[in-house]
Structure formats: C-alpha cells, structure tokens
Amino acid sequence: MEVLTITDFLNYFTNNSEQIFDYTLEHIQLVGLAIIISILIGVPLGIYLTTNDELASTVLQITSIIMTIPSIALFGIMIPILSIIGQGIGFLPALIALILYSQLPIIRNTYTGIKDVDPNIRDAAQGIGMTTVQRLWKVEIPNAMPLIMAGVRTATILNIGIGAIAAYIGAGGLGSLINQGISRSNNTMVLVGAIVVSILAIIADLVLKYIQKKFTPKGG
Amino acid sequence: MIQFNDVSKIYNGSVKAVDNVSFDVQDGEFVILVGPSGCGKTTLLRMVNQLEDITDGEIILNGKSLKELNKIEMRRKIGYVIQSNGLFPNMSIEKNVMIVPDLLGWDRKKRQDRFNHLMELIGLHPDEFRKRYPHELSGGQQQRIGVARALAADPPVMLMDEPFGALDPIIRNRLQEEFLQIQKEVNKTILFVSHDIDEAVKMGDKIALLRDGQIMQYDRPAEILNHPKNDFVSEFVGQDRVLKSTSLYSVKDLEQTVGLSPHDDSARIKTIKENTSLRIILSMLLNQEADHLVVEDSHGNKKGSLTLDHIEKFLQVEVREKNDGVSLQHE
C-alpha cells in the first residue's frame, strides 16, 4: 500500500476541486432536504405524542428499531420496494432512508422536550386562561426548543455520515469519492472524501449550534 | 361572590378528595382554606378555575354556575398564583406580568401603563425589571411578580395556592404584610390555600378548616381560635390558640373592652402605640422589659398604662364570655 503524503493529498484536491465541490453540493442537497422533511414530520409528531402516551411508546420503539438497521441494509431494502414505482436506485431511496434515520432523534427530543416542561409552568399557563394552542406556542415549544434543536443537530450529523453510504445506491454525494476510491484502491480519494464529510459535519454542527442559540429563549 | 353548593370531587370512582362542601365567599372577602396535607384544600381551589372537574354539586361564580361559563374566558377573569410562582422562563418580566392582558388583546399603551402601575403596587421598579427574566430574580421577587401577573387584568377573584409557602420565614412574613396592604387597595375576593394556621389567622377574614375533604369549621379567625367546634379544630389550631389569638387584637381593642389604668410618670416606663398587636405587648411584658407599659395614641398623647392583668382580663372576656355573633374587627 502506498504511503500518502500531504502533497499527494493537496494535489488531488486542487486537480479535482470542481468535482469535489459538485459532490459536496449533492451531499448538502440530499441531507438538507432529508432534514427539512424530517423536521416537518418529526416535530409535529413528537408534539402530538405528548398527548398520547401509549402511541408514544410504540412510535419511539419503532423509530429505535429503524435506527438499529444497518444503513447499507436499509438502502438495500429500499431498492425492491421503490422499484415498484421505478425509483429503486438514486436520490429518492436515499432521501427516504435518511428521513427514517432522522426520526428517532427528532421525535424523541421533541417529545421529551415538551414532556419535560415544568408541570407548574404548564399548570400556570392553563390556569391563567391560555388555550391549548397558545400554551403550546407561547410556553411549551419555546421552553422545549433547546432539546428539539439538539435532536435536529444529532440527526443532521448522523445524516451527513450515513449520506456517504447512499452513493452505493447511486444517490451521488461525497460517498461517491469514497466508493470509487475503494474500488480503485486510491487511498487519496477515500481520504479526501472522508475528510470533506467530516468538515461538512463540523460546519453543519456549528451552524446549527448558532441557530439553536438564536432560537433558545433568553430566559432559558 | 363564590358559592359552593354540595361540591364533591371523587377520583377513580371512590377516593373522595372533596366531600359535599358548601360555603359562600362574599365579594371582597379574603378566605383561607387551611388543613393538613391531603385534606382537599388545593383540589377545592382548583375546582374554581376548572383545573379540576366537579364530580358533584356546583360552584356558582357571581350568580352563574361554572358549567355555563367558557373555561378559557372565565380563567382570564380569575387571578391565579401558585407556590412555585409558575412564571414562564422564556418570557421577560413584562411579558410574564402582561400575559393575560396580552391574551385579552389590550393595546400597547394600556398594557404599558398597567405594567408600571402593577410594579409600583408590588414595590418593584418597572424599568429595572421590565426586560429581565424570571431566573435573574430572587424567590421573593419572583413571587411578587406572580402576584402582579395574577392582578394584571384586574380580575375580581383571586385564587392563591400557598403563594408564600416556598419562601423563607422572613421573606414570607414581609410578603404577607405587603399582600395585606395590596388587598386593602385592590379589594379582591380571594381564596387562599395554606397549611399554616398562623398564616391563616394573620391573613384571612375567614378561615375554612378542612379535613378529609370536609369543612370542619368556617368562621372568622377569632371564632376558630376561641371557639373551636370540635376536637380536630382545637388540635389543629394548637394548644397555644389563646396566644395565637392575641395577634388578632390591638391595644385599642383591649382599651375598649377592659380599659386602661391611669399612668404615672415614673422614670422607667416604656411607651407603646395604640395599634400594637397584643401578641407583641404580651411578649414585652413576659420578657420583663417593663412591668407596665404606657399607651400612646397616634398623636403621642399618653392614654394610660397596662400590665399582664389587663391582658388576662381581656382574654377572659373575649374568649370565655363573648358569644358567637359579636363582631370583632379583624385587621
């Protein structure tokens, strides 16, 4: 096995910067869309589950089980199912798999965040005459925000990593670099792919941390 | 006016938290619900703003049964203060205090004026606290804000669930005094839950003493202390109930009932104001700070002197000889 030097690495990077940029963009698109859809599903679902304890434990169990499925297997399962509508490989199965993986952290954190709001505060909100919707928007969601955002952060980081595997089912993204690198025994390619994925994850985490701060009420 | 007509609350089909309770609270009256834990006092309170359903009987608020009222609207017309203050940590003090006016859709100017007024009422500087958050305040300040929030939309009725219970004794005492002053100004109809008979005696126009969901006695504090209706009441108020009752009277009450002795101008005398509580006088005399005290009216004129004998005689008259129905002004 050849020994990698920094020079090899930088050379590869500069020579292929355009393609790396395209892959990164694809990666961001895939993960970004998956997270947006996951939030739209997971947050309302998590909030709803706080009103139905039985359903909550079932849903949380199902999402936990989904998390335990190895990602490569989940992508594999998507192929026959989505082949029915002619979308067996590519962007759509990858998107769906990522959405499924995001559900546990997002739903669980939303559910826990709302449930953990001090019962005295909830009691006061009710006692002074807030409607259920007002209580949710003015009191419960703002106070659960740090936990909800922490769930979104976890899901995003997770998806950036798992998204790299989606290249195996033709979804593109930075996984393609790693994938091709492995088949060509090109360590530089593998390393560049891995490093860019890591950098992406770090940047995403920092950005979300900033957003989390913005969203967290000052009194929290 | 709040009327409780045969009100019961039954949990899980069998546990009677509130058992067939009937009593009236007149407009402007300050009524304390007191009793040991589990006696149903908090449940009874929470039934008034419908945080607890009524299993049986009815509660009538200003002539209307609660069942006829819209839950949300009626709650906005009832001030609600709880022990742990229940302030919203995500909202500034101004937003917290003004939450009900906000829900009612008051305009900005009206809200601001009201906020300034309320903060002055509770003795906190409006501009200093407006932008701050609950966690930045001390326990006593938070509880004051809780009271201000309950008063915000000027509701005729206030429900207070052990509002000063979590505070240390010194702060609790101060807030009790302050709240009595505020009540003189705002004159609300108040239901106040407490487990502390001293607090009840100090604050209430009337006390409803509960056990196992039933009212044991509903009376003015002096009646509860001086004429307990049964063993439970006398045990709950304590064997020192005569001593407790001394805090209900001032020197002026004593003067009107048994009179004072003429005073001499000897060198070692202590003077006291007419409105001093008998409890303090008693303590001073027992402490042997002086064997007699000279009473002054608010203009500084000496009116006479009193000794332990006077207090003994007064308590005999009040406790043993006066019958029910004699009006005693409780301050």
Image (tube, coloured by chain):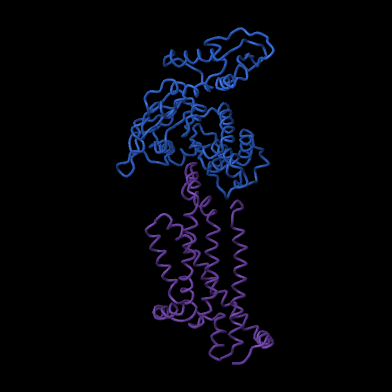
Q: Is residue A189 left or right of residue B245?
A: right
| Position of the N terminus of chain A by quadrant | bottom right
A20 up-or-down from A211: above or below: below
Q: Which chain is purple in the rendering?
A: A
Q: Is residue B165 left or right of residue B218?
A: right
Residue A103 image offset from top left, x and y in percent: 47, 67
Q: Is residue B77 visible?
A: no
Q: Which chain is blue in the rendering?
A: B
Q: What is the total number of numbered labels drawn onto the structure image?
A: 0
**Nearer to the camera, B1 or B257:** B257
Residue B146 image offset from top left, x and y in percent: 56, 40
**Nearer to the camera, B295 or B111:** B295
Residue A157 image offset from top left, x and y in percent: 55, 71
Q: Is residue B180 left or right of residue A54?
A: right
Residue B74 image offset from top left, x and y in percent: 46, 38
B81 up-or-down from A172: above or below: above
